[in-house]
Amino acid sequence: MDGDSNKGSMRVNEMQNWWVSPTNVAYHFGTSGTAVAAATAITHPLDVLKVRLQMQLVGQRGALTGMGQSFVQVLQNEGAKSLYRGLTPALMRSVLYGGLRLGLYEPSKYVCDLAFESNNILMKIASGAFSGALATALTNPSEVLKVRLQMNQNSSRGPIEELRRISSTEGMTALWKGVGPAMVRAAALTASQLATYDESKQVLTRWTPLEEGFYLHLFSSTIAGSVSTLITAPIDLIKTRLMLQQESKVVGTYQNGFHCAYQVLRTEGLRGLYKGGFAIFARLGPQTTITFVICEKLREFAGLKAI
């Protein structure tokens, strides 16, 4: 009995310490946001290619342009600068979304631990899904801005001008287009990334000579990036299609995420749901690795325990 009560007291104290200290809160969100922003800046050109690939042959079956060929076409037709379209809203979103998505994971785990006295894989998945969905609901406008700027190759508008144009011609609600699939994607992404990373670290430390440090973070994050890509690629495509309906006349009108998935399957086949899949993996794999490696190092500098 005494052991159980002490364990419960330790959980309560840990939770209280997290919320009471503004510095601790700032460190959690700051390290997460900075890590995601750094990874986003490095992998942004792959994100541009991913969006372009997802929008090819809408409503049609046929041979798809590969990532390499798409990269060459963009460079030849639009120049290297076009690979950084939408970078400003992407970085802005990374700081807010990344800070919330990763920063809320630990307190969510603490709440689950207090409520269910368990921190098993299901609790980790639930914690990741909650933090990812909430972060996306709050930052969806920056994602809409990003994909609009990435896709509109003939526009010279910046993020502020594009924001004004969307709000004046489509209304403020347009900034939350695709928020449903985006929340589902973020929930699936965060749950698969963080739960896989968390569990991979435990398995690797138990069954290999690896200890807390760079190589453990590297291998665990690589596994997490691979798993999250397989799970989220179809949801990412649906989110992109919904956000770009107004911009692309060939898309037609999707009523919601389920209708979009049905239409893609009906007109483009199962392969259509994985358009841009290799670009997603090429981006999300390194981005996941960079994010966790940087985040763990920043947490070490800030005096926080490893994820």
Image (cartoon, grey):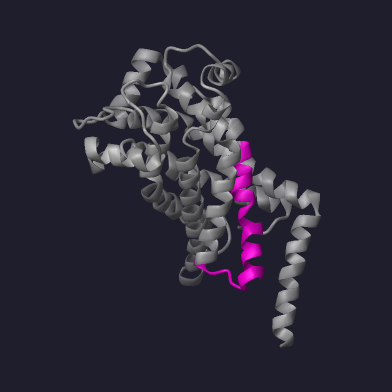
The quadrant of the image that shows the C terminus is bottom right
Q: Position of residue 288 (x, y in %)?
A: 49, 46
Position of 170 relative to 91 (above/below): above
Position of 113 relative to 62 (above/below): below
Range of magenta residues: 95-121
Position of 113 relative to 219 (above/below): below
Q: Please name the residue shown 43% across and 45% down the image.
A: 285
Position of 156 relative to 190 (above/below): above
Q: Tell me if residue 100 is in the magenta stretch.
A: yes
Give whichever of 280, 138 is nearer the camera.
Answer: 138
Any part of residue 90 in sight: no
Q: Position of residue 135 (x, y in %)?
A: 59, 44
Q: Please name the residue shown 39% across and 14% down the image.
A: 78
Q: Residue furthest left?
A: 62
Q: In the shown orientation, is residue 220 left or right of residue 54? A: right
Q: Residue furthest front?
A: 255
Q: Tell me where residue 136 sits by quadrant.
A: top right
Give whichever of 102, 261 is nearer the camera.
Answer: 261
Q: Tell me where residue 57 sits by quadrant.
A: top left
Q: Position of residue 259 (x, y in %)?
A: 34, 40
Secondary structure mostly seen in the magenta stretch: helix
Q: In the shown orientation, is residue 193 left or right of residue 11? A: left
The quadrant of the image that shows the N terminus is bottom right
Q: Please name the residue shown 50% across and 71% down the image.
A: 206
Q: Position of residue 199 (x, y in %)?
A: 50, 64
Q: Tell me if residue 235 is in the magenta stretch.
A: no
